[in-house]
Image: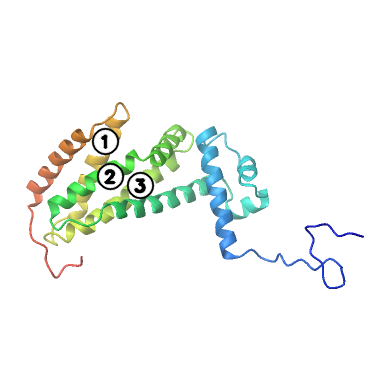
Amino acid sequence: MVQPADQSTDASGKPAPSRRGRPTAERVAAIDAEIRAAALELFVELGFEAASMDAIAAAAKVSKGTLYARYESKEPLFRAILEQQLEEWGQRSSAQTRPVPEDLEARLRQYARAIVKVQSWPEFRRIATLLTESARAFPDLAREWDEIITRRSVEALQRDMAAYGDPHIDWSFFAQLFHSAISGWHRAESGQRHVEDEEIVAFSDKVIDVILASIGSVPVDPALPS
């Protein structure tokens, strides 16, 4: 009897024992990436509510058991997608904001441009739109998204601002003020019309002037961590 072409045999011509075993770490990561990519496309295409776990499994070409073994529902799956996107955007944004300016004013201007640039990326906008459309049914997801991205941005900004000035100043407050002003203004304006680069620069400069007038610009203290 002729063995099927895709079935391995041993020296005697008999079917060899299966060597499938447990998937490698690389394969596990690849499956997870395929699931997240398929889920995001369906969330964007159908909406978060309409996209079912069965449809996600089919689109990712995995069994429902494989999908549910990793994510018990759409909520943790979407959170995993958000975490992955934020990690990728953070790395991409950091790479685009090098070298780091040596004075606080220039660094704040760089941060302002980076915040606006991230919010202008198509992949950022489609997830933001998806969350806005799903906010009524799943308010926790929209709130978590805003909290995570704001917290990460503010923490990074706070560290940099503190390295340029008096350690006794409440840099957390000024970092939150700066991020909220730039991010909130751009989000509101870009939702209604196209915002020109000159407008972004002008508004950012006003915010930076207010912050610098409040805290003063002082030299870097060598004793502070960079």
Under tag 3, what secondary structure? helix
Viewer-side residue, 43 vs 34: 34
Determine whether, in the image, residue 211 is placed left or right of residue 24: left
Q: Residue 220 occupies which quadrant of the picture? A: bottom left
Could you tell me residue 108's position as x and y percent? 18, 49
Residue type (three-letter) at the residue carrying disc 3: Glu
Could you tell me residue 144's position as x and y percent? 40, 46
Viewer-side residue, 138 vs 80: 80
Q: Quadrant of the N terminus?
A: bottom right
Residue drawn at x 10%, y 48% as measured from the top left:
212
Viewer-side residue, 192 vs 9: 9
Q: Residue 122 occupies which quadrant of the picture? A: top left
Q: CA distance from mark 1 to mark 2?
A: 9 Å
Q: Residue 57 occupies which quadrant of the picture? A: top right
Crowd tier of the residue under label 1, counting other residues whose Cα lies within 10 Å: few below 14, some 14–19, many 20 or above: many
**Residue 115: mark:** 2
Residue drawn at x 14%, y 70% as measured from the top left:
223
Determine whether, in the image, residue 9 is placed left or right of residue 89: right
Dots 1, 2 in contact, CB < 8 A: yes
Determine whether, in the image, residue 7 is placed left or right of residue 113: right
Q: In the rendered structure, which disc, 3 or 2, sits on the residue that comes first in sequence?
A: 2
**Residue 147: mark:** 3
